[in-house]
Image (spheres, rainbow, N blue to C red):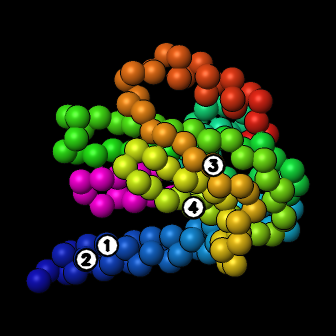
Amino acid sequence: MSCKNTLLYSALLTLCLAGCSSSNNVITQQSQIQDNEARVDYFAQRVFPEREFIGLMCRNQRLTGVAQLRDLPPGEHVLWVKAILYHAHHNNGAVKEATAKFDVSLDGGKRYTIERLRDGDELKLWIAESSSGEAVSEIVTTQATTRAAVSELNYNTQFNQCRDGTA
């Protein structure tokens, strides 16, 4: 192997190791929660043929993707949750959605998880404190419907729900 190739491989190895160490710092920062914030995680199941994503549907009182962590100020909140369900073998892979409203009190320095029980298109959703598993909200039962059947009306409804929520 030539000296030039050895230098090239050494440089690539150094870059790879530097990338790994910096991504570790990002993960550590994401796992730390400040006393002046409450973190709400999303639920994701990515096992083929079914995929589910359930999370807060609003950020700054605007619609956004559900597969994101949210840091909120501690205190009383009105939170809107959206469930998006994909199934590759039913209805030509139709996407279904459901929403639910939660009135919750979140403590600073804590992490919360959106929990669910699913029976077909029926979902039971609630928010729990992650470390203890203790529910901090009521259980809301909702029905997932095909996204295409309610698209424009659904968007306007969800847009207004976000404006009425606190996230």
Say left or right for 70 vs 66: right
Q: Is residue 153 magenta?
A: no
Q: Quadrant of the C terminus?
A: top right
Say left or right for 105 vs 8: right
Q: Residues within 10 Å of mark 2 (few under 14, many from 20)?
A: few
Q: Position of residue 14 (x, y in %)?
A: 39, 77
Residue bearing the label numbered 3: 140
Q: Position of residue 81 (x, y in %)?
A: 61, 44
| Residue located at (69% from left, 29% from top) | 161
Decide which of tag 4 and tag 3 comes sooner along the chain.
4
**Contact, mark 1 vs mark 4 (Cβ under 8 Å):** no
Read off the magenta span.
43-53
Amino acid carrying label 1: it is Leu
Q: CA distance from mark 1 to mark 3?
A: 52 Å
**Contact, mark 1 vs mark 2 (Cβ under 8 Å):** yes
Q: Position of residue 151 (x, y in %)?
A: 45, 21
Q: Is residue 45 magenta?
A: yes
Residue 67 showing in the rendered view: no
Indicate which disc residue 165 carries.
Answer: none
Residue bearing the label numbered 1: 12
Residue bearing the label numbered 2: 9
Decide which of tag 2 and tag 3 comes sooner along the chain.
2
**Contact, mark 1 vs mark 3 (Cβ under 8 Å):** no
Q: CA distance from mark 4 to mark 2?
A: 47 Å
Closest to the observer, 128 or 31? 128
Indicate which disc residue 115 carries.
Answer: 4
